Amino acid sequence: MRRTTSPRLAAVMLVTACVMFDTTVLGQTPEQEKMWEAQRAQKQAEEKIKAERLAKEREARRADPMAWVRTLDPMAPGGWTFRAVGADGSWATFSTEHQLKRSGHTVTAWLRQEYAEPHRSADGDVYLSEVEKVQYDCAKERARVLLVIRYAENNLTGSQQSDAADPKLTEWDPVVPGTQSEYTFRWTCDAGSAGTRPR
């Protein structure tokens, strides 16, 4: 004679087995509890030290943003020229006249951005520096980014990730007055109108 288990009895047996499994897995000996508590305390202490160090670094950059900029490689062979630094020392911008191209009222240029603290891209990649190939419409005061290359470390070093855009599909963004973008726009359009030739 074959015996069958009712669905209700099967469910009770399954719940009982899960509870016993959880109790076995989650049960801690006093030694394990002490060890895990010590590990948690150590991690909290390390995080506190890291936060305090970061706060001091930020305070130092706010006090003298250029001190951080001077730690960066000017990368003179690429023609990079320092242009601006954030008031809090969190970023610095460089530009180059290398490969500067003008076509009518449109100027295309390379910009370099350095960051004092790691940034994260939309894909989750961490980076500390990037270059952008930007096209400016000097007549209509607008811009669009054609290519971005992000680097894991400062000075355009370390692993890299790039995002390219199709100029036919990329929309123009207005250059907002009083922003870093306007400063870069003015410099680029002035350099392009000065008869600068691609190198």
Image: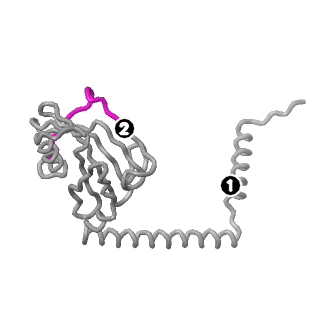
Q: Return the residue nearer the eye: 155 or 50.
A: 155
Residue drawn at the location 72% of the way across and 50% of the way down: 16
On-image quarter of the C terminus: top left
- Where residue 37 appears, x then y in whole percent? 59, 71
Q: Return the residue nearer the eye: 77 or 64.
A: 77
Which stretch is magenta? 164-176
On-image quarter of the N terminus: top right
User: Circle 2 sits in a helix, a strand or a loop, which is it?
Assistant: strand
Q: Return the residue nearer the eye: 77 or 115.
A: 77
Residue drawn at the location 44% of the way across and 69% of the way down: 50
| Magenta: main secondary structure | loop
Could you tell me how far apart the alpha carbons at marks 2 and 1 are, in whole angstroms? 47 Å
Residue type highlighted by circle 1:
Asp
Reading the image, the residue beneath label 1 is 22
- Dividing the picture into quadrants, the one containing residue 106 is top left
Reading the image, the residue beneath label 2 is 163
The answer to whether residue 170 is above or below residue 46 is above
Residue drawn at the location 28% of the way across and 36% of the way down: 146
User: Circle 1 sits in a helix, a strand or a loop, which is it?
Assistant: helix
- Where residue 6 appears, x then y in whole percent? 75, 36
Q: Residues within 10 Å of mark 1 (few under 14, many from 20)?
A: few
- Where residue 73 appears, x then y in whole percent? 34, 58
